[in-house]
Image (cartoon, rainbow, N blue to C red):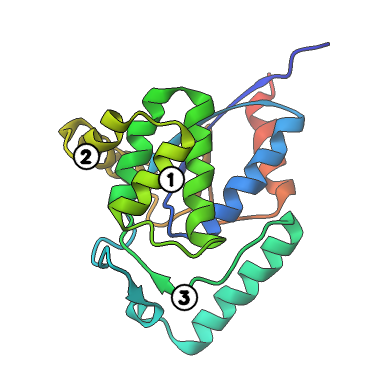
């Protein structure tokens, strides 16, 4: 069997962003043509939120804007065949992002198990991923070592990685998530799959 060409993509993402959840699934479709090497760069988009969870109204979106977002989310979720329950609350994501950064040390299999479980916990099961108790359960079920789970929130190295992600995003003029970096091209938001494939082909042209 001929080996698939390697495709390196950097993704800026947050676990409380539903478009990041859907964008993750859309990007994975490229695995039929490429060996994906994804550099996940996590950005905290709402540091002002409480870890105990806040009403959706805390986002201060107009009713019209919120309904437009929901319409787009439902459309993309249907296109991807992904279960997406509309969040009943919004929460602080910093501890989840730190946990994901720590989870990278566990290898690809465990990291992706954790990565997908964090998205599903919030957008499918409606769990509060701002809670460390919830995060401990998710991480343990994903195979993350208990000591590493706790170090995610005490080791400054992981906080420094989040800071590094922020500075990296600024270098690409990225101000929102999700953002997908294919070489010199930045795709902001969940564009059609054809756009992802076009960006991938352009990267792999000699």
Q: Earlier in the sequence, mark 1 or mark 2?
A: 1
Badge 2 density bin: few <14, some 14–19, many ≥20, Cα 10 Å: some
In the image, residue 66 lies at what x, y percent? 50, 80
SS label for mark 2: helix
Name the front one of labels 1 and 2. 1
Please identify the quarter of the rendering in which residue 130 is found. bottom left
Q: Is residue 188 above or below residue 115?
A: below
Name the residue carrying label 3.
88
* Residue at (56% x, 74% y) in the render: 69
Where residue 79 appears, as percent x and y from the top left, is 75, 59
Q: Is residue 143 left or right of residue 151?
A: right
- Residue labelled with disc 1: 138
The CA distance from mark 3 to mark 2 is 28 Å
Which of the two labelled residues, at mark 3 and mark 2, occupies the earlier sequence position? Answer: 3
Q: Is residue 125 visible?
A: yes
Q: Position of residue 157 (x, y in %)?
A: 20, 30
Estimate the spatial distance between the alpha carbons at disc 3 and disc 1, rounded to whole Å: 20 Å
Return the mark for residue 62.
Answer: none
Q: Is residue 187 left or right of residue 96?
A: right
Whether residue 110 sits left or right of residue 102 in the image: it is right
Depth order, front residue of 202/40: 40
């Amino acid at each position: 069997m001929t080996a698939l060409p390697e495709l390196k993509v950097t993704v800026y993402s947050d676990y409380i962003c539903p478009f990041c959840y859907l964008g993750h699934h859309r990007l994975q479709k490229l695995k039929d043509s490429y060996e994906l090497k994804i550099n996940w760069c996590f950005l905290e988009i709402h540091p002002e939120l409480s870890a105990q969870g806040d009403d959706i109204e805390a986002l201060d979106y107009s009713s019209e804007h919120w309904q437009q977002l929901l319409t787009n989310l439902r459309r993309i979720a249907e296109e991807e065949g992904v279960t997406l329950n509309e969040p009943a609350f919004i929460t602080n994501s910093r501890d989840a992002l730190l946990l994901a950064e720590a989870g990278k040390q566990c290898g690809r299999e465990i990291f992706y198990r954790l990565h997908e479980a964090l998205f599903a916990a919030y957008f499918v099961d409606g769990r509060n991923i701002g809670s460390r108790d919830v995060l401990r359960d998710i991480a343990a079920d994903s195979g993350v070592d208990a000591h590493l789970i706790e170090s995610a929130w005490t080791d400054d190295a992981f906080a420094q990685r989040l800071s590094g992600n922020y500075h990296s995003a600024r270098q690409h003029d990225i101000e929102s998530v999700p953002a997908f970096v294919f070489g010199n091209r930045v795709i902001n938001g969940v564009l059609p799959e054809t756009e992802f494939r076009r960006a991938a082909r352009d990267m792999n042209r000699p």
